[in-house]
Image (spheres, rainbow, N blue to C red):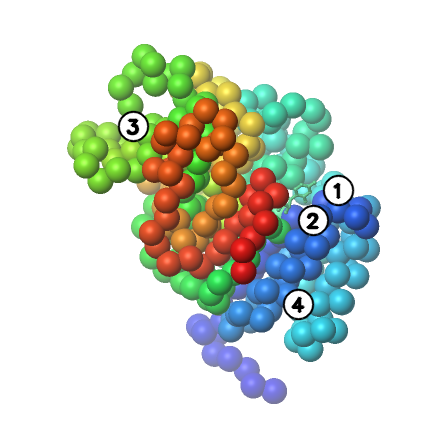
Amino acid sequence: VNFLPVKTIKDFNVWLIFTKVTEKSPLKYKFHNLLENILNISSVPLKFHIIVDNSSRNLAVNEISDVVSHSNKPIHYNLYDMDICAKVISDIVEAMMPHFSSKPGTYYSDALFYISLGLYRIAPHSQNRAVLLDCDLYFKKDIRVVFEEFDRFKSTALYGLAPELTPVYRHILQGYKMKHNSTFGEYYHPKNITKTMPHPRGFQGYNSGVVLINLSAIRKSEEYSVILRTKSVQSLTSKYKFRGHLGDQDFYTLMGFEYPHLIQTLNCGFNRQLCVWWRDHGYRDVFDHYFKCKHPVVILHGNCNTKIPK
Ligand code: UDP
Ligand code: MN
């Protein structure tokens, strides 16, 4: 047995959410393909942490053993119970749900869309950093390069996120933008510079299909624990007249505008979204400004059920 010196051991924690799945769900195949893809392309010792519910647990275990038997590589994983996770973050979900859920239901059914905000309570204390991934992703490069982004975080960053690549936040903020001359919701444009603003060149918001989470920094952050409270979420959403439907990423988008020091913006290649729904729903003229991504692609994201070209 070779023991590594402690300093070289790093946390390569990959979190996935796999709930409300049935035998026929597309999510089952997405989960299978993603595990296979990550195993094939990655060079670091990963630990998977998978949040499941009662109806999805056995499906997850079956898919994992299927991938293992075909790849001849082991998968190190732990399962976590969604009901327990939902309870642990219920205060966060209750604060967020009225503003960021499409049909606010019970905190229970909505919790899955807010896990990333409370993962610091769910993950064992021994974990210092984690990457939470959607299942509808395809890695073009080694996941090692994603973990290396943690080393580039500014000292105040709690989360690392890539931009949203559609005008959805331009749409949501149109009421606010009619009254205020703001770069919030505008596409990123190098010419559009006003130095006093937090995002002088336009801010498209964030997408939460790939979330880098600095767990130990979040656990220590007094500021973050205050921002998550009902009162803070209320004042933030009313300031921008913000009514969203995309869960955690709506909150990160507001955070990124109001508290930019807390988020590290990753380049778009780390979450190259493919959904073009907004192009055909009123935003044809500006869509491409939001959608363009000139960085090398590390991860493709087949969001809104878009087929991923391989
Ligand atoms: N998810 C889940 N059960 C569901 C829906 C979603 O476990 O019924 C998880 C799954 O990990 C999925 C993620 O939530 O990848 C986000 O959903 P999706 O990727 O479909 O959203 P999109 O990226 O299209 O907005
Ligand atoms: Mn997705």
In the image, 155: left or right of 61?
left
In the image, 130: left or right of 68?
left
| Amino acid type, callout 2 | Leu
Labels 3 and 4 touching (C-beta < 8 A) = no
The kind of secondary structure element at disc 2 is helix
Instruction: Write the residue at 62% across / 59% down.
Output: 34
The kind of secondary structure element at disc 4 is loop
Q: Earlier in the sequence, mark 3 or mark 1?
A: 1
Tell me the residue that label 4 is attached to. 76
| Amino acid type, callout 4 | His
Rounded to the nearest angstrom, the CA distance separating label 3 from label 1 is 38 Å
Residue 72 visible in the current orientation: yes
Rounded to the nearest angstrom, the CA distance separating label 3 from label 2 is 36 Å
Instruction: Write the residue at 22% across / 40% down.
Output: 190
User: Where in the image, quadrant-wise, is ligand 1 located?
Assistant: top right
Q: Earlier in the sequence, mark 3 or mark 2?
A: 2
The residue at label 1 has a CB less than 8 Å from ligand 1 = yes
The residue at label 2 has a CB less than 8 Å from ligand 1 = yes
How would you rate the neighbour count of disc 4 (Cα within 10 Å): few for under 14, some for 14-19, many for 20 or more?
few
Rounded to the nearest angstrom, the CA distance separating label 3 from label 4 is 44 Å
Q: Tell me the quarter of the picture where residue 292 sits.
A: top left
Tell me the residue that label 1 is attached to. 20
x, y percentage for residue 7? 44, 72
Q: Earlier in the sequence, mark 3 or mark 4?
A: 4
Q: Earlier in the sequence, mark 4 or mark 2?
A: 2
- 284 or 89, which is in the foreground? 284
Residue 118 visible in the current orientation: no
Q: Tell me the quarter of the picture where residue 97 sits.
A: top right
Tell me the residue that label 3 is attached to. 183
How would you rate the neighbour count of disc 1 (Cα within 10 Å): few for under 14, some for 14-19, many for 20 or more?
some
Tell me the residue that label 2 is attached to. 27
Instruction: Write the residue at 76% across / 67% down.
Output: 65
